[in-house]
Image (tube, rainbow, N blue to C red):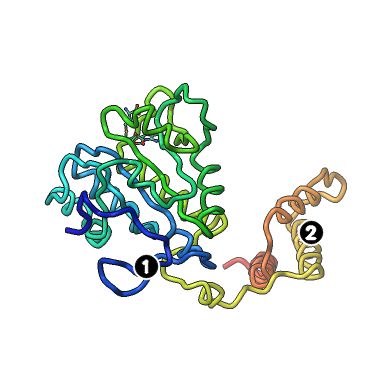
Amino acid sequence: MGGGASGAAEGPATSDCQRCNKGAHYIVNPDTPMQALANVRIVLVRTSHPGNIGAAARAMKTMGLKRLVLVAPQSFPDPVADARATGALDVLQAARVCATLEEALAGTSHTIALSARRRELGHRVLGARDSAASLMGMARDREVALVFGTEISGLSNDEAGLCQELVMIPADPEFSSLNLGAAVQVMAYELRVAAFGGSAPLIGKRKTEQREEPEAEPAKFEDIENFYRHLETVMLETGFLDPANPKRLMPRLRRLFSRIDLEKEEVNILRGFLNSLITNKKRPPK
Ligand code: SAH
């Protein structure tokens, strides 16, 4: 499996990949969200359960992140990690293994430490969403890293101290420690949403296809006014609206319908229904 504890610090993002000689994997000055996501490293420090490494790889791949860096993992490569990664074996295979956190962070311009608890480090403490937004802004043209601690004790103060910010996932204060893989998933999701400017596209439709279905024609002012007149006439005819005591029936119905953006077709359905009431009423009983 890829990596190796002796692996040199990753070079500049534009250098050719030493592993596959297929040119640079990661692009500086990216123009697209995917390229910004490619500038993000997920660093797992002293992970004790290989299953969590696999889970993190899967969490990353589902959100378009590919660069996994492992600092002194207890067991890696490991079949348990492979099993938990399922379709994200490629992320595991490309993972870099480092002996120290310093080595893992070499080449980055901004690093954040993920922590389930506050510390007396004097760091700026940010919530997951705010930090993801600012981090993705930076990742457009530089390398950034998110650093996650070991399962039992989290990051040591020295490890967290190597990062510029402390980030917390705003969990229930009574039980705030997420499983490592789950914490990676939450942050990877926030990064993806932030990379796409707050709204990541849904699966199955490319951006160009998103407006494939013809837009429904919205009802015009006069369509809606004609509908209100029609409604009032029918309510008078059926006796539902008493002209001597109209109360605020019409204004309230106007308020009800103005909460929806009625489409022309929908107004036609409503008016067809109103017609059917009158027609049926006039029909002689069987
Ligand atoms: N008991 C440890 C938590 C270990 S969980 C502690 O108190 O720090 C493993 C890692 O998942 C943590 O080191 C942290 O990087 C991440 N993590 C878990 N819950 C988190 C939360 N609510 N906010 C931010 N990171 C969290």
Task: Identify the amino acid type marked 1.
Answer: His
Position of residue 192 in the picture relative to residue 83 (left or right): right
Q: Is mark 2 within 8 Å of ligand 1?
A: no
User: Looking at the image, which residue is at 45% across and 41% down?
Assistant: 112
Q: Is mark 1 within 8 Å of ligand 1?
A: no
Q: Answer few, some or many: residues within 10 Å of disc 2's Cα (few below 14, many 20 plus, some between 14 and 19).
A: some
Mark 2 / mark 1, whichever is N-terminal? 1
The image's mark for residue 25 is 1
Q: Residue furthest left?
A: 79
Report the residue marked by disc 2.
232
Position of residue 42 in the picture relative to residue 214 (left or right): left
Residue 228 vertical position relative to residue 71 in the rendered view, above or below: below
Instruction: Residue 230: give x, y in percent of width and height.
Output: 77, 65
Q: On the rendering, which quadrant does ligand 1 occupy? A: top left
Task: Identify the amino acid type marked 2.
Answer: Glu
Name the element at disc 1: loop
